[in-house]
Amino acid sequence: MNSLVLYHVQDRVGYITLNRPEKRNALSYELIDVLRQTFQTALFDPGCKVVVLQANGDAFCAGADLAYLQQLQNFSHEENLADSRHLMELFKLIYSFPKLVITKVNGAALAGGCGLATVGDFCFAGSGSTFGYTEVKIGFIPALVMVFLTRRISGSIVRQLLLTGDVIPAERALHMGLIQEVVDPGKLEETVHHYATHLARTTSAQSVATIKQMLCEIPSLSIDDGLEFAAKMNANARSEEDCKKGIAAFLNKQKLSW
């Protein structure tokens, strides 16, 4: 695996680590490409049930690589559109990933890096970490991350974050509902690993994949279409092996471990 991104599995938890600390893990074209490949590796790894996205260095991700942004100014509209779609596919992959994704933030998560930190299912941050969609301060726009942020928190908070570009501490991000938990930095690794292994033991992979698919699709449906889709997915789930196994264990009062 390319050294820009590291991957290892421990206790059925696949750790994907941004490894560009000298650039504060800034998002270059190559880093985005390797990150997409690594998520695909985790997807097809039978030993990985939960993914933790983390980073080496004193920043989780400082956003787009500024040197690369300078190069983009010489691109044609078509080239810039292709590049935007390159990053779009990464966010979309993580958001719709069939396995649970936890992000572990220790340091700054800014602009596209903030989007990366919050596009997964759960985000744990070390106290002292910061979050911000700072694009407005350099005359840019948080276009792609906006799509996912508006699905995560309420409109007034979205406007405050995107239109001011303010960088906020982890505790305020927690209060806004942007992240799930703030942890002492010295206990962050242990806390996240414990949470990830707990999810690996207690949740059905089939159920998780189906629920995440539904969470992606239902917001775009009308009430009637959403309910019809839900009824069909409900019926399909009843014939899945995990459901049969779970019901049998419940009826027989057996402890179930996935």
Image: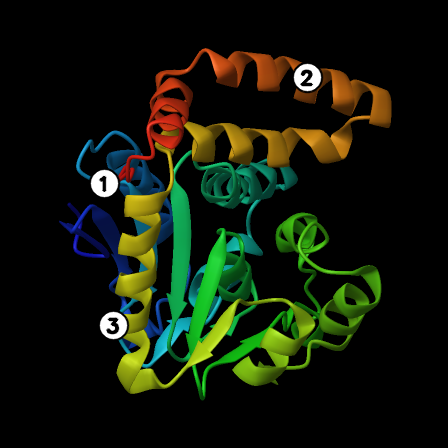
- Sequence-wise, the earlier of marks 1 and 3 is 1
Q: Nearer the viewer, mark 2 or mark 3?
A: 2
| Apparent side of residue 4 relative to residue 100 in the rendered image (left or right) | left
- Along the line of sight, the residue nearer the viewer: 37 or 80: 37
Q: Which residue is mark 2?
A: 231
Q: Amino acid at mark 3?
A: Glu
Q: Looking at the rendered structure, which numbered label has been put on residue 116?
A: none
Which residue is at a point 33% across and 22% down the rendered structure image? 245
Q: Quadrant of the N terminus?
A: top left
- Horizontal side of 103 relative to 139 (left or right) equals left
Element at badge 1? loop
Q: Nearer the viewer, residue 138 or 70?
A: 138
Q: Which mark is residue 190?
A: 3
From the viewer's side, name the closer residue of 194 and 33. Answer: 194
Q: Quadrant of residue 134?
A: bottom right
- Colouring scheme applied when the structure was drawn: rainbow
Real-space CA distance between mark 1 and mark 3, rounded to the nearest whole angstrom: 18 Å
